[in-house]
Image: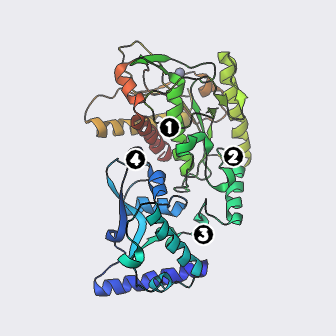
Amino acid sequence: MNYTRNILLALFCLVFQRAVLTGQNHFQPKNCMTVVARSGEDVPLLLQRYGLSDFSCNITQFFKINKLREDYRLKSGATYKLPLWVIPYNGKSIRTTLQLEDWQTAKRIETFNKNAVKQGLRSDNFIESKKLWVPFHEINCEESEAPVAAAKPGQAKLVAEGDIAAGGETSAKGNRVFPIFGPKYAKTPLASSRLKGKVFYLISGHGGPDSGAQGKRAGHTLCEDEYAYDVTLRLLRLLVSHGATAYMIVRDVNDGIRDDNFLSCDKDEVVWGNLTIPRGQKERLEQRTELINQLTAKHLRAGQRDQTVIEIHVDSRSQDSKTDVFFYYRPESAESKDLAHHIHRTFLEKYLKLRGQRGYNGSVTPRYLHTLEATTCQRAVYIELANIKNDWDQQRLVIKNNRQAVANWLFHALTTH
Ligand SMILES: [Zn+2]
């Protein structure tokens, strides 16, 4: 494989040189395929349409060629470049077009082009149109970022063992499918490894017998625990996709990430390890912090000191009080206070960008809350996203893009601290 890659790299250098000399640069972005994002698509889903999502290098490349940050959210209807080159086909063979030694790579590229026709992604045949589609991963994937789903059996096994050893959400059989995200979002390719070794414990408030605060909207009951869960799960997916070891402490095996406006209320959530959530509030909170403390100790023994606890709520106040985001930190903990202030600043910046000067009244205060007192992990922040009874606040919750935006902001804040 190394040999093949070297040949390919050499070839690309040659072609690049020739292109510079002749003024026909085949590898400028204009020779990338472009695609229009559909509503609700994230980068992996968009790449999945073109059979490119199984290779994390494609995802990294996507951000690079589109000059986007890794927490960027795709805009429905906007055009993006794909990590998929269009190369003039020489009319003879793929191997001679690309000067490939490796027959199997050529065969895979051929299959890729044929499948693109079958799947309706292209209407022309590369032999007739002389336009060969070459996926970026066939040319430039580092072996350390080996294909995850299509990997050779040995490689797939390594990925799975690595994930299990790291703890947190684990992917089945090394193909980075995380059932907790639900069928639509389960496939979560590795976009980068920049959070490798960092540990996150995410708690969505309430759950199980306790659905938390409730609001009413358009004849629906809004349960706090469901909306907190969805935002938390979206944050978890971002963390996992960048290589973090992250735990979803409260779990619902049949919910996943939901794109509906109204999330139905249920009581079947459990806690990590498939533990039933007790009825009593004290027992319920202690169950979570004891579990997190055990995991914290385990990761500390493994030398992982970079650990963070985030708890997310959507509480209620009087109907007419609009609530911006409240952040609570552990009294007397500088680490907790710093992180809370950093997330708050990030939200201030994002709100300012979004709404100009419009007032944002989020606050950061110390508070004696169970999670903030009982976890051995000092870096803990407790967040109240909105008032579930207030009409204006409800809009922030019922629109899935808004839930995603909040998750993106939290992700941005957590990864820039
Ligand atoms: Zn709450």
Which-is-in-front pick, marks 1 and 4? Answer: 4
Position of 33 compared to 95: left or right?
A: left
Q: Residue 184: percent from the left, percent from the top?
A: 52, 44
| 10 Å crowding of disc 4: few (<14), some (14-19), many (20+) | some
Numbered tag placed on residue 167 in the rendering: 2
Q: Residue 129: percent from the left, percent from the top?
A: 36, 76
How far apart are labels 3 and 1 at the CA level?
Answer: 36 Å
Which residue, given by chain and number where applicable, does mark 1 sit on? 339
Q: Residue at x 54, y 23 (%)?
A: 265
Q: Is residue 101 above or below residue 377?
A: below
Helix, strand or loop for disc 4: loop
Task: Name the amino acid type tagged 2.
Answer: Gly
Numbered tag placed on residue 73 in the rendering: 4
Which residue, given by chain and number where applicable, does mark 3 sit on? 143
Q: Residue 379: percent from the left, percent from the top?
A: 58, 36
Label 2–label 1 contact, CB within 8 A: no
Task: Name the amino acid type tagged 3.
Answer: Glu
Q: Residue at x 51, y 17 (%)?
A: 213
Label 2–label 4 contact, CB within 8 A: no
